[in-house]
Image (cartoon, helix red, strand yellow):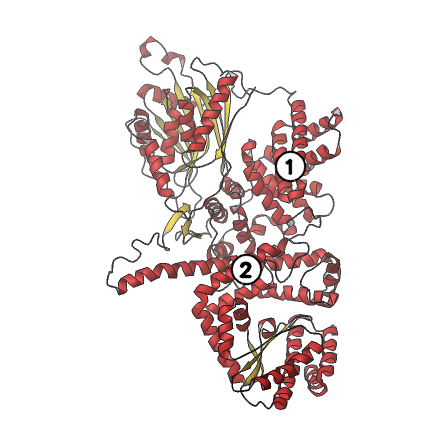
């Protein structure tokens, strides 16, 4: 006789006492745990309750027409040591009320006498269906109805009817279920981040896993199955061990029980337990997000289809979808190989992830910037097919990572999608050590990995305060990366940061800055709160550690972002003020070193001089293109003076990196050159990655009285541009549009406004809530000009709007240095008054206000 058969026999023969002994023996069995034990406990309980029903039916004189049904977790056969018994006494209505009451007492009272929690009801099938229609929780429990004893046909009929009702009512009930899940998550928090999580009620817990089963039963959508069953099993195993450790029906994994629960599960320690629980919760949470999006998509599609169907039935006919808004099948380009469809970001039909290693980052950056989720299919295709990035990464990959990190709150959802399919650890192998790693400090509200992402989110809002937001964002992502290693995490993190920064393509100087930021990311807050700032040695030590004003500026922003991402107790107005005081003192020490004048004349190359001469002679713009892709061989230059046609449009080879081109424009000095050139590039959907504007001197032999009618000089604009998607425009079209913009026949403002209006017609494109632009004056940066610094979100036409604002302010742009870092533009404009002198301080402040006001209005 098998152990299970012997246990069942003892239970049936010995009554409640036999069940209690068999139950205790089962729970104390060290060799049986997890799903086998839960299943055995459910089966053991089935046999006991079946015997109770049989005996009670005989006593009450009831024959057929009654059944005992397990519902909820008991119905699924997932009976934990202290789980409630959810039981329905089902009857066909033929038995009298007194007989039913007697039968119910015969079943319920032994359960209560055992000290077991019981959730019970007595209903006919019609009553059960009616109650389910009124109470969503009852309906969810009945979806897992399982026959225990009695009339099996009665149970089967109820199951069939309940499932049919659920599938019919799903369009109405599923939104209600979604709302319940959201409310529960708000009350109990996210399981994957809590130090004392509720394994059942918290978001990502067992309740959400049950909701996914209900969605699947509706046939409207199904959850991604990979890893979901294992996640549920691990959460149930942890709950079982918790019940046995406490002897109570609790689902909260309190700190004092975690070591005991970890030992019962054979895990190393409480941290290992929490990490396993967090990973399981993350799987359930991600599956829930994906599945609820699919439910919403299906319900939207059905809702949109009904009016069209009614119109067809009434004979109106017409084109399907006419007047109903944007078709769910419409595909709108977002980036090369990436489109939006149905409110999600998907891969373009021509995308070839197996030939485009940057595509995962480009898709993620596009999704985050658009405020849209990455579709499950797209992420899985990228995970399955994308090639590894070369080391070091190409510049586009680094820029896309920075754009992703700088997108703000929408970064989190996209990052989680990449994480769920293993793409993050593939891109950043060191991430594995911090993934789902708990932080025991109660000040921290996130796991280490989520804290790093949240710090990047906070840093994106501070990006206007620094000249290198790219370094700030990457430092935010890496500052605690050493917490996955033994010893001081700042020391370990410095080494890891150097390796990661070099791998993703930063040069040596930037790698050194990032390493310093990670090594000293706690320096400012710890010094400000623990040292005497009036002691000169304190300030000198910080200055020596930081080394430069640029690093100090970045460290200040990183300190604030880190604290804000830690939790509400980690940052306050007082802490902010003393850190700012320390930064001010350190900056004064660092300012003792002489600063180089950034306005010093630059060396003019032979090509630049040739372009300047051609522009001066023809009186019009001259363009030179240096291709960085297969569209034009490396080093090939196309010089297009006025009246000369350019080469045919350069199509991007399938599977290559997006076209990147160095564009030189030489044009006779005249008002409006900068906004005109920037506007033309924006109209042609060219993204400006970097730009420089300066005056170029002409050879002495070209100057003289004979040339008095010509322009006094030539402006040279050096651009690094890339097509937003698709191929590059024809160079001849760029030159012709620039000519029209300069002579006033091309209304750039109106054309850009039309595009913006068309873009805003689609409210589903939520986009990113970027911090407002900031325009400041950099005092002491130059003796020859006033330096106007602009930090703003990189959007189409930004440089055009800045140029117009400076023109409207009646200042001359002596030179411009434009840099796009991820989603941020950091631009410096050296301006003078009409006499060529630097602006007076009051006038400089006015110009900054005017430019900032123009950008905020735009």
Q: CA distance from mark 2 to mark 1?
A: 35 Å
Is residue 154 placed above or below 292 in the rendered structure? below
Task: State the image coordinates of residue 740 (x, y, percent, origin top left).
Answer: 30, 28
What residue does disc 2 label? 181
Q: Quadrant of the C terminus?
A: top left
Q: Nearer the viewer, residue 857 or 637?
A: 857
Whole-percent x, y for residue 747 in the image: 31, 31
Q: Secondary structure at mark 1?
A: helix
Residue 300 location (% of width, % of height) = 40, 58
Q: Is residue 810 visible?
A: yes
What is the residue that sits farthest to the front in this orientation?
98
- Mark 2 or 1: in front is 2
Q: Name above or below for residue 691 compared with residue 79.
A: above
The answer to which image quadrant residue 263 occupies is: bottom right
Q: Is residue 141 above or below residue 619?
A: below
Q: Secondary structure at mark 2?
A: helix
- Give the residue displayed 53% in from the left and 69% down from the top: 140
On the rendered structure, is 348 left or right of 824?
A: left
- Residue that carries the numbered disc 1 in the rendered image: 559
Across and down, in percent, residue 79 comes to: 64, 72
């Amino acid at each position: 006789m098998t152990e299970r058969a012997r246990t069942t026999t003892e239970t049936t023969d010995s009554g409640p006492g036999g069940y209690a002994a068999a139950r205790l023996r089962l729970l104390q069995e060290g060799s049986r745990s997890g799903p086998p034990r839960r299943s055995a406990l459910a089966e053991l309980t089935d046999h006991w309750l079946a015997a109770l029903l049989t005996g009670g039916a005989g006593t009450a004189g009831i024959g057929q027409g009654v059944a005992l049904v397990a519902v909820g977790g008991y119905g699924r056969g997932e009976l934990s040591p202290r789980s409630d018994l959810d039981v329905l006494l089902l009857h066909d209505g033929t038995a009298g009320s007194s007989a039913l009451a007697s039968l119910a007492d015969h079943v319920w009272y032994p359960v209560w006498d055992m000290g077991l929690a019981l959730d019970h009801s007595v209903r006919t099938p019609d009553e059960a269906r009616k109650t389910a229609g009124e109470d969503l929780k009852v309906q969810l429990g009945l979806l897992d109805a399982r026959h225990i004893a009695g009339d099996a046909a009665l149970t089967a009929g109820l199951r069939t009817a309940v499932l049919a009702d659920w599938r019919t009512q799903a369009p109405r009930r599923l939104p209600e279920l979604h709302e319940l899940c959201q409310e529960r998550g708000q009350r109990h928090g996210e399981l994957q981040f809590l130090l004392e999580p509720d394994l059942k009620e918290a978001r990502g817990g067992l309740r959400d896993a049950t909701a996914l089963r209900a969605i699947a039963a509706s046939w409207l959508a199904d959850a991604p199955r990979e890893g979901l069953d294992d996640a549920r099993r691990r959460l149930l195993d942890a709950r079982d061990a918790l019940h046995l450790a406490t002897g109570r029906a609790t689902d909260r994994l309190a700190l004092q029980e975690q070591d005991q629960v970890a030992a019962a599960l054979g895990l190393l320690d409480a941290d290992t337990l929490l990490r396993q629980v967090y990973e399981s919760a993350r799987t359930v949470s991600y599956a829930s997000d994906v599945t609820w999006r699919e439910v919403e998509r299906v319900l939207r599609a059905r809702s949109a289809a009904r009016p069209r169907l009614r119109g067809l039935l009434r004979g109106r006919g017409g084109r399907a979808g006419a007047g109903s808004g944007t078709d769910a099948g419409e595909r709108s380009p977002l980036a090369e190989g990436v489109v939006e469809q149905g409110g999600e970001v998907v891969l373009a039909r021509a995308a070839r992830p197996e030939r485009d290693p940057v595509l995962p980052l480009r898709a993620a950056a596009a999704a985050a910037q658009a405020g849209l989720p990455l579709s499950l299919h797209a992420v899985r295709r990228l995970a399955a097919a994308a090639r590894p990035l070369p080391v070091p990464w190409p510049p586009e990959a680094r820029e896309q990572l920075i754009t992703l990190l700088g997108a703000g709150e929408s970064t989190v959802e996209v990052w989680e999608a990449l994480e769920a399919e293993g793409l993050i650890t593939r891109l950043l192998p060191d991430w594995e050590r911090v993934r789902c790693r708990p932080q025991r400090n109660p000040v921290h509200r996130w796991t280490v990995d989520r804290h790093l992402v949240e710090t990047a989110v906070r840093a994106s809002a501070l990006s206007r305060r620094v000249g290198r937001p790219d370094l700030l964002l990457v430092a935010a992502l890496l500052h605690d990366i050493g917490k996955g290693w033994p010893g001081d995490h700042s020391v370990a993190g410095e080494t890891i940061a150097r390796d990661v920064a070099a791998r993703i393509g930063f040069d040596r100087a930037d790698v050194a800055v990032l390493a310093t930021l990670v090594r000293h990311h706690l320096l400012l807050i710890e010094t400000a709160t623990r040292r005497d700032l009036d002691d000169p040695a304190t300030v000198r030590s910080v200055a020596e550690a930081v080394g430069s004003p640029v690093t100090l500026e970045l460290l200040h922003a990183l300190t604030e972002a880190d604290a804000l991402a830690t939790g509400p107790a980690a940052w306050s107005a007082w802490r902010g003020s003393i850190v700012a005081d320390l930064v001010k003192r350190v900056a004064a020490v660092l300012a003792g070193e002489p600063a180089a004048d950034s306005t010093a004349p630059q060396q003019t190359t032979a090509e630049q001089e040739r372009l300047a001469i051609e522009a001066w002679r023809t009186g019009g713009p001259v363009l030179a293109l240096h291709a960085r892709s297969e569209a034009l061989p490396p080093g090939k230059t196309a010089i297009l003076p006025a009246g000369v046609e350019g080469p045919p449009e350069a199509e991007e080879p399938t599977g290559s990196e997006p076209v990147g081109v160095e564009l030189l424009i030489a044009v006779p000095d005249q008002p409006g050159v900068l906004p005109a050139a920037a506007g033309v590039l924006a109209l042609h959907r060219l993204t400006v990655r970097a730009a420089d504007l300066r005056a170029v001197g002409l050879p002495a032999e070209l100057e003289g009285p004979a040339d008095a009618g010509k322009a006094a000089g030539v402006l040279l604009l050096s651009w690094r541009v890339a097509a937003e998607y698709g191929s590059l425009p024809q160079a001849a079209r760029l030159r012709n549009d620039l000519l029209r913009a300069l002579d006033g026949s091309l209304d750039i403002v109106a054309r850009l406004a039309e595009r913006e209006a068309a873009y805003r017609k689609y409210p589903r494109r939520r986009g990113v809530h970027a911090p407002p632009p900031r325009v400041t004056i950099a005092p002491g940066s130059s003796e020859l000009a006033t330096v106007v610094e602009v930090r703003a979100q990189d959007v189409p036409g930004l440089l055009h709007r800045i140029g117009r604002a400076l023109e409207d302010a009646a200042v001359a742009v002596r030179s411009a240095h434009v840099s796009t870092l991820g989603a941020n533009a950091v631009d410096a404009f050296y301006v003078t008054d009409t006499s060529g002198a630097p602006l007076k301080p009051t006038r400089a402040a006015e110009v900054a206000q005017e430019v900032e006001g123009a950008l905020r209005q735009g």
